[in-house]
């Protein structure tokens, strides 16, 4: 990271293009492992792969979105695990993301089953400017 900061003045990180619920809050909902996807913007790589976010139904109920449990062969239990796994890749690379997709057991059921689904997602770059370049030329 230091070499990148010196050379480019910024760090470019790979992202899926989602928002997520923090692990502590997800645990309160009964999600013991993985990262619950809250939102998947339509212009994101995750959306293009078919990832589902959490949403409110027309009747006002909450429909739980995908739960990210693996990036390639790395298990994901928390958002820290997700960030650490993504650090192994570069923007533009395609990764296999395994999610547990909640589905109702039946149309009238109040409980759901988790179905593993594997998606291929091309990572996007997220640039964070850290060091201004050539601020002082003396």
Image: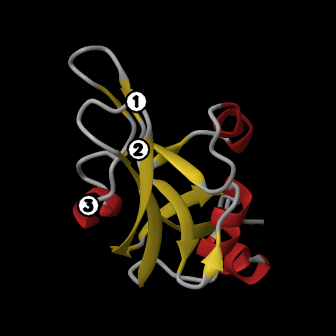
The image quarter containing residue 69 is: bottom right
Callouts 3 and 2 close, C-beta under 8 Å: no
Q: Position of residue 85 (x, y in %)?
A: 64, 74
Res. 16 in view:
no
Colouring method of the image: secondary structure
Res. 32 in view:
yes
Q: Front-most of 137 and 8? A: 8
Sequence-wise first label, 2 or 1: 2
Mark closer to the observer (3, 1): 1
Sequence-wise first label, 3 or 1: 3
Q: Position of residue 61 (x, y in %)?
A: 35, 20
74 left or right, relative to 94 = right
Mark 2 closeness class: few <14, some 14–19, many ≥20 residues within 10 Å = many
100 left or right, relative to 121 = right
At a point 63% along the width and 83% down the height, the residue shown is 88
Mark closer to the observer (2, 1): 1
Q: Secondary structure at mark 2?
A: loop
Residue 50 has which mark?
A: 3
At a point 59% along the width and 52% down the height, the residue shown is 35
Q: Front-most of 40 and 98? A: 98
Q: Disc 1 marks which residue?
A: 110
Callouts 3 and 1 close, C-beta under 8 Å: no
């Amino acid at each position: 990271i230091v070499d990148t900061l010196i050379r480019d003045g910024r760090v470019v990180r790979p992202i899926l293009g989602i928002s997520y619920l923090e692990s502590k809050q997800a645990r309160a909902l009964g999600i013991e492992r993985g990262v619950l996807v809250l939102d998947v913007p339509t212009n994101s790589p995750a959306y293009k792969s078919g990832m589902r976010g959490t949403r409110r139904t027309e009747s006002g109920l909450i429909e739980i979105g995908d739960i990210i449990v693996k990036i390639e062969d790395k298990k994901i239990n928390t958002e820290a695990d997700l960030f650490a796994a993504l650090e192994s890749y570069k923007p533009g690379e395609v990764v296999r993301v395994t999610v547990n997709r909640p589905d109702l057991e039946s149309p009238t059921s109040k409980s759901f089953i988790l179905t593993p689904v594997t998606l291929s997602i091309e990572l996007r770059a997220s640039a964070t400017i850290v060091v201004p370049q050539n601020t002082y030329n003396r």
